[in-house]
Image: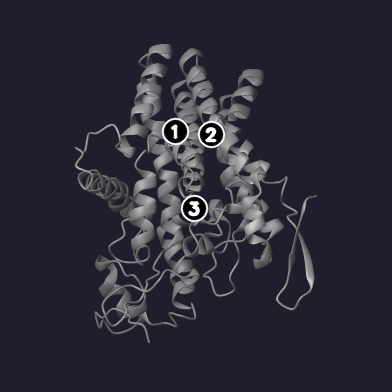
Amino acid sequence: MKGFTATLPNGEATVYVDRKRWLWLLSVAYPLEPLLGIWLHSVTGNELWLLLPLLLNFGFGPVIDWMLGEDRNNPPEQVVIQLDRDRYYRRLTYATVPLHFLTLIVAAWYGGTQALSLPGFLSLALVTGITAGLAINTGHELGHKNSRLEKWLARIVLAVPAYGHFTIDHNLGHHRNVSTPGDPASARMGESIYKFAVREIPGAFLEAWAIEKDRLQRRDRPVWHPNNQILQSYYLTLVLNVALIVAFGWIMIPFLLLHHLSAYWQLTSANYIEHYGLLRAKDENGRYERCEPRHSWNSNHVFSNLVLFHLERHSDHHANPLRRYQALRHFDDAPQLPNGYFGVYLLAYLPWLWFRVMDARLMALPHINGDLDRVNVCPDARAALFLKYGDDKKTEPTLE
């Protein structure tokens, strides 16, 4: 395996080897899950095989994460720049982009041309949408980079789930306002994922549109200008969807609607668990403190990180947004999720269980230490939470 050599502060030479170097190929292959289910259905005629991605993600995924455990190893800081510049890793993200299109097109062809039952047809659309949620993750990794190529690839891949506004809102809205009450993509303590979705999905679009509109106006351009980066991705979505409808018939309309909604739900699931209840303090001037690792929930579980381009090392990502996935680090003081994302999603889908597990975990964090005034609290749940955890002082935390 390739090694990266550097000199430590004490003068000693060190060689770092990324033992997961080839395992990152799992992130490239994972969007192809529905094609395996399609092949097994074509061989057996059993439509249950179309649901295979559900079993892999939410059945086997949490168990594999539990069995393999966590990997808290970090690359030495002295080799991070070398690791970041290794083009092998970025080429994996490039290669993933066309595979997202391939999965959607093949699934649409199969759903539009085969004699599937209604449950079978809807199952195929649902699971293909789940893997389209991975396209948002691919766009997330690409969209944070400064190269023109990667920014364009992000807009292109976001056309698959019809979520072209993501990069604008995520980079310029979410990263600026993360873990504050004003961020639509930061979940509040006492807010269920279903209530969060009603706020987050439209809120993210409206925020992105306002940001892009402002950018264009400062350049004396109308909002509908061809340089509108949101519309550039949505135009490609329109072309792709119309082409599928023309090729495979009007049945593609419900297929694509369910596909897109399923993809949106995957992003909502990730956003919900990544910053639940966490709150940045304000300084004496009323400005929020810099985002630190303690403002994002982290997970070091091996399997789900390998198939999600290290998305779950979210604490370092928010502290260092330009850092590439292979170089993201673990921090001992970062809040830790009890499982990988797939397992924690299941927990979130049962609000009573989520609150029971995560509220206690949230309040036990060292920087919160049971103080509800240091938590991003859902206004509707405020009275009940303060009755349980303390007096409602209605104050915001400040930096000490």
Quarter of the rendering occupied by the C terminus: bottom left
Query: Amino acid under label 2?
Result: Val
Query: Amino acid under label 1?
Result: Ile
**Residue 319 point in image, percent of width and height:** 48, 65
**Which is nearer the N-term, disc 3 or disc 2?**
2
Q: Nearer the viewer, residue 162 or 392?
A: 162
**Residue 360 point in image, percent of width and height:** 46, 74
Residue drawn at x 33%, y 62% as measured from the top left = 177
Q: Nearer the viewer, residue 282 or 226?
A: 226
Residue 345 disc label: 3
Q: How crowded is mark 3: few (under 14 residues within 10 Å), some or many (20 or more)?
A: many
Residue drawn at x 49%, y 13% as measured from the top left = 113
Frontmost of labels 1 and 3 is 1
- Does dot 2 land on a helix, a strand or a loop? helix
Q: Residues within 10 Å of mark 1 (few under 14, many from 20)?
A: many
Marks 1/2 in contact by CB < 8 Å: the verdict is yes
- Does dot 3 land on a helix, a strand or a loop? helix
Q: How many numbered dots are placed on residues in this image?
A: 3
Residue at mark 1: 156
Left or right placement of residue 46 versus residue 239 in this view: right
Question: Disc 3 versus disc 2: distance between alpha carbons?
Answer: 25 Å
**Residue 296 point in image, percent of width and height:** 47, 65
Residue at mark 2: 97
- Does dot 1 land on a helix, a strand or a loop? helix
